[in-house]
Image (cartoon, rainbow, N blue to C red):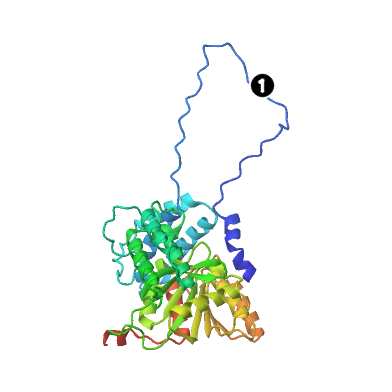
Amino acid sequence: MLRVIALAALAAAQAFGQAPAAPVQGPVQGPVQEPVRGPVQGPVQEPVQEPLARPEPVTRQALAELVQQVDARLAAALISGSLEGEALAAANRRFDSISLRFFGGDLGAVRDELRAWVTTLEPAPARDAARDASRPEAAPAESRSLADLRGEVEAQLAHATIEDTGSLRVLQSRLALLVDAPSPERSREFLWSSPALAEAVRGEAQRLLAGERPYANVVGDLWRTVPHGRRDLAVRVYQPAPRGSAPVHAAPLPLVVAFHGAGGDENFLFELAGDGYLKRLADEYGFLVVCPFTPDYTFGGPAFDSLLAALSADYSIDPARVFLLGHSMGGATVSNLCRLRPRSFARAACVAGFGKVGAGSPPVLVVSGALDPIVPTRGLARSVEASRAAGADVRLEVLEHQGHTLLLPVAMRRAIADFGLQAVAAAKSGS
C-alpha cells in the first residue's frame, strides 16, 4: 500500500491532464505527392502569421490563492455538516478532479477550473486575526528594503558570541525568508516575507543577543526550523493561548504532529483543510500542533527524533500524549513511523493514506472517503486487514459522499476524538 500511495501522483500524471502526443516525424513511408502546378497568376502571397499570444504563467502562488478561496468558501459548510448528500459528493468529485489535473501537470486547466468554481461560491467570512499569525498586522513603514533589514540583523549576529546555537539556527532560517521579491514558487517566501516578519525577527535577534531563548513557549502561529544534523527542517507550530490570564499553560500540552500530502508543504494544513481548521481544533482541545514538511520524514526515524527533541526543548509537552496525524502521503509517512518509532507516540490517525503496520504499532484510526479516486477505500481496507492479521490495533472508518481532500475537516475532528483529547474551550471562556 505504501508503494501505491507513493506512486499515486505519478499514476495521475500518466492518466490525466497530459497533452496529446505530437505525431511522429520521420521518413515518408509512401510515394511523395507533388503539388499540382499551373500557370502562375502573380506573386505568391505568404500567409500573414499572427503572433502567438503567450499563455498566462501559472505559478504556485496563483494556484495557492485560488485553492485557498475555494477552501475558505466551503469551510463553514464542511465543518458544520450543512453540505451533505449529493451536494457534498459533487463538491468532492470536483475538487478531486482538479487535484488529478494538478498531478497531471495541466496547470492552466486547474487555474481555469478553480476560477470558475470561486465565482459560484459565497464569499468567506474574515479570518480570525488572533489565530492567523501568517497574515499579521502591517509593521510601521520602513524606508529600507527587507534585504537591508536582514543584513542589519546578520551583521549584529556576526559580531556576537552566541551559545544557544539551536535558536541561532532558527533565527537564521527566518532571516532567510526576508527577500524583497518573494518567489511565487516558494510558499515560505510569498506567505511570510513581509515588514511584519522583519520587525518580529529584529526583536527575536535582540532577545537572543541578550541571552534569552526567543522561541521558547511562543504562543500562536510560528514558521521555524528544527535542527537535524547539518540540515534545518522547516515546520509550522501553533500553540494556543493559555487559559485565562496565566502567562504559561498550567500543565504540559498534548502534541499533535500533522503530516501533509503530496503537492503540499508545511503550510498546507494551517492555511487550507477547512481554512486552517486544525488551529481551531488546537484552541478547542488545548493541544500544541506542528506541521512538518512531510518528505523530510517519509523514511526518517532520526528526523522525527530531532523534531521531538527540538519541540520538547522549546515547549512544555506531555510525552505520554504525543499523537500523529497524516493525510495521503502523510498517512503513509505516519504508517512508516508506526514501524520505525512505535514507542515515541501514543496513537495515530491516517486519512486517505495508510500502509500495513505490525503488532508493535500504536493504535491507528484509518479514515477513507468512499469516493476517493486517488487512494481508493478498497486498497486501504486491504492494508487494514493485513495489519489486523499481523496483530495491530487498526480501525477503518469510511465517510460516505467524501473524497480525497475535502474530508479533512471531518476526519481531523474524528482523529482528535480518537486520541481521547477533551475540549477545553468552555473552560477558557469562563476563566
- Viewer-side residue, 99 vs 91: 99
- Viewer-side residue, 178 vs 169: 169
- Viewer-side residue, 209 vs 121: 209
Check the image and report above or below for 324 versus 102: below
User: Callout 1: helix, strand or loop?
Assistant: loop
Q: Amino acid at mark 1?
A: Glu
Work out whether residue 114 can be spotted: yes
Q: Residue at x 50, y 18 (%)?
A: 45
Q: Residue at x 64, y 68 (%)?
A: 3
Check the picture and name the quadrant holding the N terminus: bottom right
For this view, does 49 lie left or right of residue 242?
Answer: right
Residue 393: x percent and y percent? 59, 86
Check the picture and name the quadrant holding the C terminus: bottom left
Residue 380: x percent and y percent? 59, 74
According to the picture, the residue beneath numbered tag 1 turns out to be 34
Which quadrant of the structure image shows residue 224?
bottom left
Q: Residue at x 43, y 66 (%)?
A: 160
Which quadrant of the structure image shows residue 131?
bottom left
